[in-house]
Image: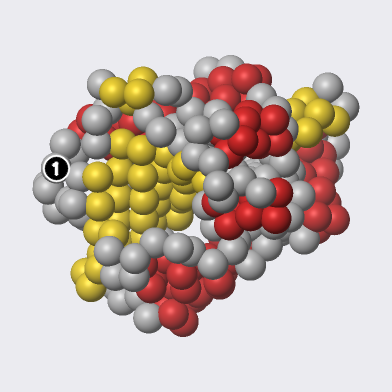
């Protein structure tokens, strides 16, 4: 394990005179503006990025991210991904890494790979596998990675964050090696009841889902976005696109 280095493109701070320093003003700018974030209604949100984010970045949110990871591990029966990547990938990118837990597990599982996790805020742990690094990036901006360089790009639950999915998917395609894989995962929060035992017109679960969809529409980050991914993958040139839909049970069983 080694201490990770969180980096930010210095161009974002060039108008503040940080280009001449790499040890004082530059680092303090990260601590003062990005690390601190923006407090609103008792929660902390990212201060870096092109657009306003719908999800916070505070400790409570990182705990939710870790619990969410556990949920997906159960849902996928212990698998970290569904893409049939090789046993010795060289470069893996985790976009919207959040708490960094998926990237850490991937770095442990694939020691051959250089794993990079990117997010708008440096909320990840400092002690991580030696083949993992975290960076501050806004994936809705132009990607600065080398083209055709990643074996696998992964994004999970980019909730209330992406406004232009076709652009993100296109940039992922451009940054993958030939034969590489892009895997996106998202919860579609529409409530169903197979045995009709719950009235979806009066259910609190169904009402919460309706409110989520309304929030997404108000912020121009529709929760229905994942329904269009398959065709968007094909439109930029991906081949053999597979869509997997899994039910997520809600209740006390």
Which residue is identified by label 1?
Answer: 112
Q: Secondary structure at mark 1?
A: loop
Q: Residue at x 19, y 39 (%)?
A: 110
Seen from the viewer's position, the closer of residues 36 and 234 is 36
Q: Residue at x 17, y 51 (%)?
A: 89
Is 74 situated above or below 79? Answer: above
Q: Position of residue 194 (x, y in %)?
A: 59, 42
Residue 243 visible in rendering: yes
Is 191 situated above or below 235? Answer: above
Q: Quadrant of residue 242?
A: bottom left
Q: Position of residue 239 (x, y in %)?
A: 31, 76
Q: Residue at x 34, y 70 (%)?
A: 147
Q: Position of residue 4 (x, y in %)?
A: 37, 29
Is 151 situated above or below 124? Answer: below
Q: Quadrant of residue 57?
A: top right
Seen from the viewer's position, the closer of residues 135 and 55 is 135
């Amino acid at each position: 394990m080694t201490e990770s280095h969180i980096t930010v493109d210095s161009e974002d701070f060039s108008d503040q005179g940080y280009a001449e320093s790499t040890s004082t003003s530059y680092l303090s700018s990260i601590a003062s503006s990005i690390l601190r974030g923006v407090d609103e209604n008792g929660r902390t949100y990212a201060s870096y990025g092109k657009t306003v984010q719908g999800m916070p970045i505070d400790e409570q949110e990182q705990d939710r991210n870790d619990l969410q990871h556990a949920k997906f591990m159960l849902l996928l029966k212990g698998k970290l991904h569904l893409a049939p990547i090789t046993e010795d990938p060289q470069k893996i990118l985790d976009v919207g890494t959040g708490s960094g837990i998926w990237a850490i597990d991937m770095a442990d599982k694939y020691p051959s790979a250089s794993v990079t996790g990117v997010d708008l805020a440096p909320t990840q742990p400092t002690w991580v596998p030696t083949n993992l690094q975290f960076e501050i990036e806004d994936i809705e901006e132009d990607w600065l990675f080398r083209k055709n360089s990643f074996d696998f790009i992964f994004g999970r639950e980019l909730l209330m964050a992406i406004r232009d999915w076709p652009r993100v998917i296109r940039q992922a395609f451009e940054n993958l090696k030939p034969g590489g894989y892009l895997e996106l995962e998202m919860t579609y929060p529409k409530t169903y009841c197979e045995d009709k035992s719950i009235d979806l017109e009066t259910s609190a679960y169904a009402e919460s889902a309706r409110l989520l969809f309304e929030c997404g529409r108000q912020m121009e980050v529709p929760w229905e976005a994942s329904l269009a991914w398959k065709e968007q993958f094909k439109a930029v040139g991906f081949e053999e696109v597979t869509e997997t839909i899994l039910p997520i049970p809600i209740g006390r069983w």
